[in-house]
Structures are given as C-alpha cells and as structure tokens.
Image (spheres, rainbow, N blue to C red):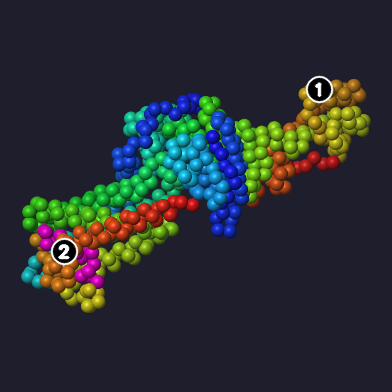
Amino acid sequence: MIRAEGLQKRFGQTVALAGVDLDVPRGAILGVLGPNGAGKTTAVRILTTLSKPDAGTASVAGHDVVREPQAVQRSIGVTAQDATVDGLLTGRQNLVMVGRLSGLRRADARARAGELLAQFDLSDAADRVLNGYSGGMRRRLDLAAGLVTRPPVLFLDEPTTGLDPTSRVRMWDVIRGLVTDGVTLLLTTQYLDEADELADRIVVIDHGRVIAEGTSAELKTATGGARLEVTLSAPTPDAAVALQPFVSGPVHVSHDGRRLRAPVRTVSGLATTVVRALDAAGISVDDVEVHQPSLDDVFFSLTGHPSVPDDEVEPDDHPVRLDVEAVPS
Amino acid sequence: MTATALAPPVGTRSPRAPGLVRRLCDVLSLTGRNLVHIAREPLQLSDVTVQPVLFTLLFVYVFGAGVVLPGGQTYADFAIAGLLALNLTTSSMGTAVGLSTDLNSGVIDRFRTLPMWRPAVLVSRSVADLLTASLCALIVGVTGLCIGWRPSGGAASIAAGFAIFLLFAYAISWGCACLGMVSKGPESAQGIGLVILFPLAIVSNALVPTQRMPPPLRAVADWNPVSAVTSAARTLWHDPNPSSTIHAWPMQHPVEASLLWCAFLLVVFAPLATVLYRRRTSE
C-alpha cells in the first residue's frame, strides 16, 4: 500500500534522506523510528505529496506520489507534526472545510464532522474556536481532519510529540481504534515505547538511512538476549555458581553480594527454574526479574548513541527514561 | 473514548467533479474561511472601516483647508474619489499580509494534502479581499455623503465609477498576493507593502491636483494607474477633475486607461502569483 524505493532528498548541504526503502502492505502499521533530524518527517512529506524526492520513487495506494499527486491525495489522511488545523476556526468549521475541500457535499461534510467530533470526544468543544483548545484536543482534531474522507492510508507524523502522558495514552487508544479495520498506517515517532505499543513492524532511521527493520521482537533479539536479575535475601557466594547452568554469560555480583545479574536466553519458565534451582541449593530469593531489552537498548546498540539526545529534549518531554546502561561483565 | 472502526471509503465522496464546479466549491469554502477569520478578528478590518472614515475627515478638513481648486468647487467634492483610491490601494496590503500568514502556518500543508484545486487558496483570498474592498468603498462613500459630497451623472455612471474602483482594488490585490509570496512573513509583507503602496497612492492626482508638482513627479503622477482610476471616477461622477486639462493620454481617456491598467495588472500578476505560489509551496 505504501512503497518507497531509494528515496533521496537534500536541503542545501544537508542530506535529509540518503536512500530510504519502505514497504507497508495493506492493513499493516509501520512505525518509523528515529531521533530528531533523522529524516522521518522528510520521508512522510514525500509520501504525502508535500515534497518531491531528488531521487527514488514512491507510490501510495498504487499511485506514484510525483506523477499522480491528486490520486494519492484522494487515498490518504495526514496528521502532520505541526498543527495543520486553522486556529481561528471552530473544530466543526475545520472539519467541514476539510470535507468540502476533499470533495464532499455540504451535508455529507457536516454529518461526517459531527461523527468525528463525537468519536474524538470533542463534541462539547465543537463550536469553540481552536485557539482555546488544549494541546491534546488540537492533536485529536488534527487527527480527525485526516480521517474526514475515511482514507485507506494514514500518515501520522509524531502524533504524540509534546503531549502530556495522559493525552498520549489517550491518543494511543484512538490510533489503535483506527487500525482495527484494515487501514494502512505509517507512523513516525521518536518514542521507542510508542513504536513498541502501536506498530507491527518498525523501521529505524538515522541520518537519512534505514539502519534496522523488523518486528519489535526481532529488533530486540537482534540486539542481544534478555537479562536476568536475582535479588537474594542474604549475600550467598554459592548463588553465582547455582545460576551458571541457566545463563549465557558471566554472572555479575553486586558489592553487597545480594544482587546478581547475567545475560540469559529467554526460555519459557525461566524464572521458575531459576527459583527452584536456588531453593534446592538452600538459597533464599527476594526477587527474580527477566528484563527484555528495551527499544532504547536496540537503538543504542544500532547507532551507538541514545535515541533522543538529552540536550534536545526537555526532561518533561521525556516519556521514556533512557536505559542504555550496559550489563557489566 | 473508543474510536469506532473506520468504514472503508464509501460513496459519500462525490466522484471527481468536472473541473469548474469543483473549483468554484473549493474557492467558496476557502472564501468562507477567510470571512470567518475577519469576523473572528474584527480589528483586522480597521483598515477598511475606521481608517477610511478617519482619512476622509482628516484630509477633507485639514488638507482641504489649504487646497484651492480652480472654479471654486469644494475640496470634499474633489477628494472623495481620491480618498477611495488611497484607501483601496493601501488596504490591498491585507492580501499580502493574509497570504503570508497562511504560508507561514501549518494549515497550508493541510490544504496541500487535500485533493483540491491548488490556486483556490489564491483566488479565495482575492475574492474575500474584494468583499472587504467593497465594504471600504461603501464606508468612504457614505462618509462623503455625510460631509457634503454629491456625485451626479446618474445611477449607472455612479455605479460604473465604483465598479472601476473595485476592479482596480481586485487587480492590485493580485500584485499584493505576489508580494505576500516573496516576503518572509506577515510583518515584512506589511513593511514592504507600505513602502510600495503609499507612494503609489500619494504620487497621483488623488489628493491634490498634479499641475503644480515638479515636472518629473508630475509625469509619474499623470501616468500612475491610481490617477487614471481617480480621474475616471471623477469624470463619471461629474466631480471636479483638474486632471482633465492635462494632455497625457491617460488623463484624456481616464476610463479606457483605467481598464487597460487593470487588465495589465491582472495579466501580469495573476499568473505570476500562481507561479510564485507553486514555487513557494514545493520542496
């Protein structure tokens, strides 16, 4: 449904895209993950006909984005990173206008606007001017504006950037609801948990290139296995030995001798097995945890730098604590 | 809140209508949007409501006191056509400012991802500005009537005078659209607009007869489209028109000159605006 081959784009000396391939089958959700400036928005702008590639081709719903922009425009809904709704119009006026400009008859545009306002919990604010909306409401209206014509392909460019945690989770619910019905969705995000939550497949972009691709699980596996953490009731030197059969690397023991950490390969029932083995050795356990690697770990191992540079993002905008601390060995 | 499942695209969407009807619909939708903007921020309209009244009163009572017209006619009779020209010319800056504001906001991206007629953004802006220009003309006219201006020559003639003014306002609004497209933001559009439009309106026969201007300035004034339009209205309204004795062709044939100027401005600036818009909105 969405296909891109060798997309390249430069702005002056800056290379925004250095050859990006994407392929999203009908009904799939692709998460395009990358830090600020990775080229995500440029890719979305090309796919939504806002920008022309310097090289490469792209098609959406079977139509070439450069040669048949209007055919593409009739198949897509777009929610861009910047607000693309009119701040001086009411919520309802915005949606009716988008409907009319998409070719709906007036009555249909009005009916559809009413439906969307109700669906996005904006009925009460429908006739208020947008400048009085909260950030979350504005984003929801922006998303609604992209859905007016029930497009089969949706592009959401960083749909939750800048939202508070509650609004974010609410937006996720809305997005999940959209994709239950065979809509093809391309979603960009800098938030690893967001891609993990919403996407079937994830493409990781950095410096205008795709550096990894796969399901969330595949990416995590590619980065290395899970990690076992055991907390003992009291320091027990034998514990490290007792763990040896289950781990895939050296066991690290903390200074106080109570916490043990080691890389493991995840197998079903691992925690039970570990507790039983320690119990059999007469070792009392307070806590056992098997940590799956986070996508932050994935990003770090792929690029060698954290997903979101600390100096570019305010702490409040940081929904995911970066957990890039490597397992000591 | 649970988002109900999206139905597949259904027949609510009219099949791609043949060009013209669809284009008109797009223009109307966006004109409606521009008018809502005005209703939302009525102060935006001050340049076509408060300013015309203020200018008319100031010029007639302050400047009028010092201008002696041949034949002892009143300055108010002379000045109303000129004040219409002045107000309509300077308020066309609104086109530049409005377009520039749009171009610098995200909403233009929304329009660009919709399967609409792209020039509708420009055309709707010019239509909305024609409506505000009409309001401006009405206000100057009524103010004039209140202070003693009495046009004559019959209803058709009077209407023709206003029509020429509105056509002129429409034509220069396309020039201002170009300005809006090349300027970085609304503030610079306003700044540049003032520098171009104010001299254009002043170096003309709008507010004073051109006869006593220094020769180079007078040559400019006599060929200025603002002078042609002002002269045309004065002729049609039987208002005092000192320019009628000037030999320059536009002053001898002000109606024809006005129509030619308007046609020229439209032929040059409407296509240029379309090209500039395309360039400004493509990457």
> Element type at marker 2?
helix
Q: Is residue B230 magenta?
A: yes
The amino acid marked with disc number 1 is: Thr
The chain under label 1 reads A
On the image, numbered disc 1 is attached to which residue?
A272
Q: Position of residue B70 (x, y in %)?
A: 9, 71
Q: Bounds of the magenta span?
A: B220-237
* Residue A23 seen in the current view: yes
Q: Which image quadrant is residue B65 in?
A: bottom left
Q: Is residue A9 above or below residue A223?
A: below
Tell whether label 1 touches label 2 (CB within 8 Å). no
Seen at 68% across and 41% down, the residue is A212
Say whether residue B208 is magenta: no
A161 sits left or right of B66 in the view:
right
Residue A159: tell me if it is visible: no
Q: Which residue type does callout 2 highlight?
A: Pro
Who is closer to the viewer here, B55 or A289? A289
* Viewer-proximal residue among A285 and A137: A137
Residue for badge 2 = B254
Q: Residue at x 11, y 59 (%)?
A: B236
Which chain does tag 2 point to? B
